[in-house]
Each structure stands twice: as C-alpha cells, then as structure tokens.
Image (cartoon, rainbow, N blue to C red):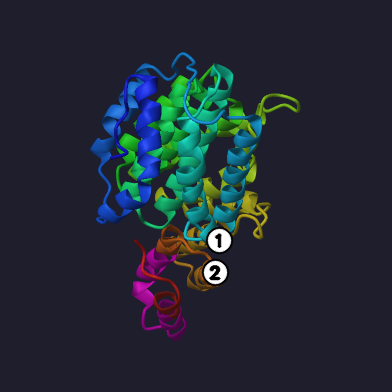
Amino acid sequence: MGLGFARDPVDAVRVAATYWRTVDRTRRQVISNGFAIAAFATPVTRWLAKPADAPIAHEGGRRVGRSDLAELWKAADEARLWDSRFGGGNWKASSVTECLRLNAAPLLTGTYTQAVGRELFAATAELSRVVGWSAVDTGRHDIAQRHFVQALRLARAAGDVETGCYVLATMALQAFLRGHPQEAADMAEGAYERGRGHAAPRVLAFAKLAEARAHGRTGNARAAKAALGRSQELLDSIRPGSHDPEQMAYMTHARLAADATEIHRDLADPKGAFAWNELAEPMPADRFTRATGIRMAVLAASHLQARELEPGLTAARTSLGILTNVHSSRAHSYLHDVTRALNPWKNHPEVADLIHRTRTELPAAA
C-alpha cells in the first residue's frame, strides 16, 4: 500500500486518496522502519520516462474551491517551518498527516476542473513530500518512502515537472542517508536533467546539491565539487522578479554552504569544511534550528579529523545544546557519530562528560 505508481492519472489519484484514507492503518502495519532502495525503481523510472500527464477533471463529491487549495498550501508552509525549527517529531507533522487524510483525500475524489485539479495535485504532492521528510527525520523510512512515491505520482498528475524534480531530489537525499549514495547520485542527476527547462534555478540547485552530497559520501571529490559548483551557479543566476517557488526559500547560499561543510567532512577535507562553515554562518539559528545543530556537529567532526580536540569539543557542546530541543533522530545521529570519533580521547574527563551527556540527553539515532 502506497508504493504503487499507476500509469493512468485517474488510477493514480484514486490510489493516493485510498492510501491517505487508510494511512493510520498502514502505519500500524509497517513497523520495520526499514528502507528498500528497490521500492524506488519503478516510480523513478516511470517519472523519468514521463514526468507530466495531461490535465484531468473529476466529477465526484463536493466542488473543490480556491479556499481549499489555499488551506493545503498553508498547511504545507506551516509544517516546513515547524520541521526546520523543532524536527520531524514535532506535533505539527502529525497534524499534516491528518490534513492529508481528512482534507486532501476527500478533495482528490471531489469535483474539480482541469485547472483546479492541477493545483490540487501539486499542493497535495508538496504536503506528502513534507510528511515524508518528517518521517525520514524521525527514522520511519518505509512510511517516508510511501509518501514520497505518492508525492512524485501526484506531481506527474499535476503536469508539474518542477514539483516532481523537487520530490525526486528529496527521495535522493533519503537514499543517500540510508546508505545508497550511488543510486542517490543517479536520482538527483535525473531530477536535474528532467527539470532543466521546467524548474526554477533554486529547485535545480537543490537537485545538484543532493547530487553533490551523494558524491561526497562515495569519496568522489571531483564529481562532488562539480555538482556543488553548478548548484552555486544556479543560485547566482536567480534574478528579482523571476519565477522562484516560495517553498524553496530556504535554499540559499548559506544553506548550500552548510551542506558543503558536510560534503567536505565526508571527503576528509577539514580545511575545506572550515572554509564553507564560515559562509554558512548567516543561517538564522532561530529559524533553522535543526540545520544549525547538525552543522555544529559536522564542524566538530571536522575538527576531530584535523586532530583538534578543544575546538571539536566546543562545537560538539554547542550542537548538543541546540539538538536537545529538536525532535529529530536524524539530527541526533550526527552527534552520536561525533562521540564515536571521540573514542581515541575517551579517557579525557571533558570527552567522557560529553559522551555521557549525549547518550543521556539525546535519544539513540534511528
């Protein structure tokens, strides 16, 4: 349930509506929290082959109006904000899942024109993507996969290549995080290539950044830096007044620098990580709380790579102070990685204290 990618758009809408009506039951049935890269094979292949369907109208329940669409977009906007500040385990994530079940699913089987249907599918795709990312953040990866697949299919039903590009790049990040960087690089590159000529530069920059992260994890410095450079060029190309999706506003030069810090940590290049970290400083910590906590953990790991214990401990303590208030097993895993990197210094009193505090104050990484 939820992993099917129907060829026919009418079937796709029906499958999505059915899935969200039964999402609570599905969550109870899916308890492994596993991730199957093979589950992405058919959805990705079919989207790359045909990223946009012809528009469809529907005659069914109540008529879908603009106010309904505005409510869906508002729910997605609020969920993104809460996710970045408090992590995917915050109460807002549950409310968005309820929005999909109680609001979006009935609308998908309602009455709407082709134009309204396109926006309905796009808004619901973004809602599903947001819920999927919250599930990634809390370690519920098989639930996340189902939401991403439905988001990708509805983006195609909406005829919205840009949204599909964004969803597929997000799926690539999940694949990367679950230990499949080669497949993640292919997915992100596919999202970029299919999005060219359709997606805004900020969306394409996100796809290239996802590709750079995947290459960094494999140790391919040349490919990682090439993708990172292209992402930076795309951000540089944005001009005032041009099409620029509001939901991508977080994808800034500072965000790119934060991820580049992690890429250079993965490449075992601490000097590069330190340089990029300085460029990431402008990210407002009160809004991007989780990202700031992760970046400080990455900075700590980079200092340890350079055998610099004291600045590593300082950055790790800062990360711990931030992430204690963030409900994100993904974010917590970064600091647990730092404690493992501290093992050579484990007899140092300050190191032992940090390891103890991390294990006590942060839930074990999922």
Residue at (58% x, 55% y) in the render? 82
Inspect this view and state whether residue 311 appears. yes
Residue drawn where x is 48% and y is 55% of the image: 94
Residue assigned mark 1: 86
Q: Amino acid at mark 1?
A: Phe
Task: Tell me if residue 340 comes above or below residue 12 in the rendering.
Answer: below
Mark 1 Cα shell of 10 Å, populated few (<14), some (14-19), many (≥20): many
* Residue at 41% across, 79% down: 360
Q: Residue furthest bottom?
A: 349
| Magenta stretch holds residue 340 | yes
Residue closer to the observer: 165 or 115: 115
Q: Mark 2 falls on what kind of element?
A: loop
SS majority, magenta: helix
Q: Which residues are magenta?
A: 335-356
Q: Residue 337 at what x, y percent from top left?
A: 38, 64
Q: Can you say whether 220 is above or below 66 in the image?
A: below
Residue flagged by tag 2: what amino acid is it? Asn
Q: Would you call the spot at circle 2 few (<14 residues within 10 Å), some (14-19), or many (20 or more)?
A: some
Q: How many marks?
A: 2
Lower sequence index among marks 2 and 1:
1
Tag on residue 322? none
What residue is at 35 percent from the left and 17 percent from the top? 49
**With 93 as the anchor, is 336 left or right in this view?**
left
Do callouts 2 and 1 mark residues in contact (Cβ within 8 Å)? yes
Name which quarter of the figure residue 203 lies in. Answer: top right
- Which quarter of the rendered picture does the C terminus lie within? bottom left
Q: Secondary structure at mark 1?
A: helix
Q: Position of residue 318 (x, y in %)?
A: 57, 70
Establish if 325 lies above or below 169.
below
